[in-house]
Amino acid sequence: MIEHDAQPGWVAVEKYLSDVVVQPDAALQRAVRTAVDADMPRIEVAPNAGKLLKLLVQVSGARRVLEIGTLAGFSTIWMARGLPDDGRLLTCEYLPKHAAVARTNVDAAGIGHKVEIRVGAALDTLQVLADLGVEPFDFVFIDADKENDSHYLEWAIRLGRPGTTIVVDNVIWEGAILEPERDEVNAPGIVSALEMMGRDPRLDATAIQTVGTKGWDGFALAVVK
Ligand code: SAH
Ligand code: DHB
Ligand code: MG
């Protein structure tokens, strides 16, 4: 797991931005509280990042969102709020316990009708979706086991279309991407995804560093060409 060595100034500024600009409501606070109560890890996106996801879904005009890594549904609720009422979000979660907590949270947030949670290893679920011939996804958020990030990118392209927006969370990992020996599981997977985003002719991408309650991290944004 990532080391959270967030500096006091970063945390205070993030709290200020969250309170003054973002203002997460009771349903989002519930998603965090229920995760804590269920002894789940505190690794949901920060509120200002969640709001960014919501706005990106909205400005991209997405009607179909694919999420890889649900946890308690915090990012799920944000993104579902960026969708029109008949939009759909399919989210992949390995752990049945996490999926069950997320189900209660998305329902309590009033966006449950937009959300399908598929339990299992995401790589298996993605193959099932391909076999089912589902409609292309307009927006993909990758936020699960980092060692599979480049495989998830490949699936995002396969299940997407030209113009599909892809966001990959946690692409800086406290700088371990430059010293992969510091994290032999996650860092190499993140580096593979970053290299793919720079090299793959099907993708147009950038990556942004962030600081705050989650320490030193960041996200990548890519569009399928
Ligand atoms: N997107 C969430 C946080 C996700 S944390 C938010 O911001 O609110 C990562 C989640 O991915 C965890 O719930 C973990 O159980 C799940 N996960 C890990 N490996 C997975 C896999 N192979 N397939 C599907 N989900 C996985
Ligand atoms: C971890 C996973 C995440 O998706 C995240 O945003 C932060 C940390 C982790 O496994 O440590
Ligand atoms: Mg994450």
Image (tube, rainbow, N blue to C red):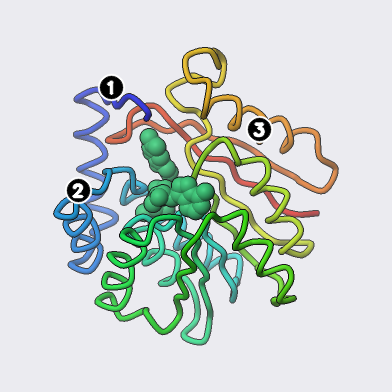
Question: Which residue is at 63% across, 27% downward?
Answer: 191
Residue linked to disc 3: 194
Q: Which mark is residue 49?
A: none
Q: At label 2, which amino acid type do we have?
A: Asp
Q: Position of residue 140 (x, y in %)?
A: 59, 58
Q: Secondary structure at mark 3?
A: helix
Q: Specify whether 66 is left or right of 1.
A: right
* Viewer-side residue, 202 vs 144: 144
Q: Which numbered disc covers residue 39?
A: 2
Residue at the farthest right position: 201
**115 with respect to 36 (left or right):** right
Quadrant in the picture for the C terminus: bottom right
Say whether disc 3 or disc 2 marks the residue closer to the N-terminus: 2
The quarter of the rendered structure image containing the N terminus is top left
Q: Secondary structure at mark 2?
A: loop
Q: Position of residue 54 (x, y in %)?
A: 44, 62
Disc 3 residue: CB within 8 Å of ligand 3: no
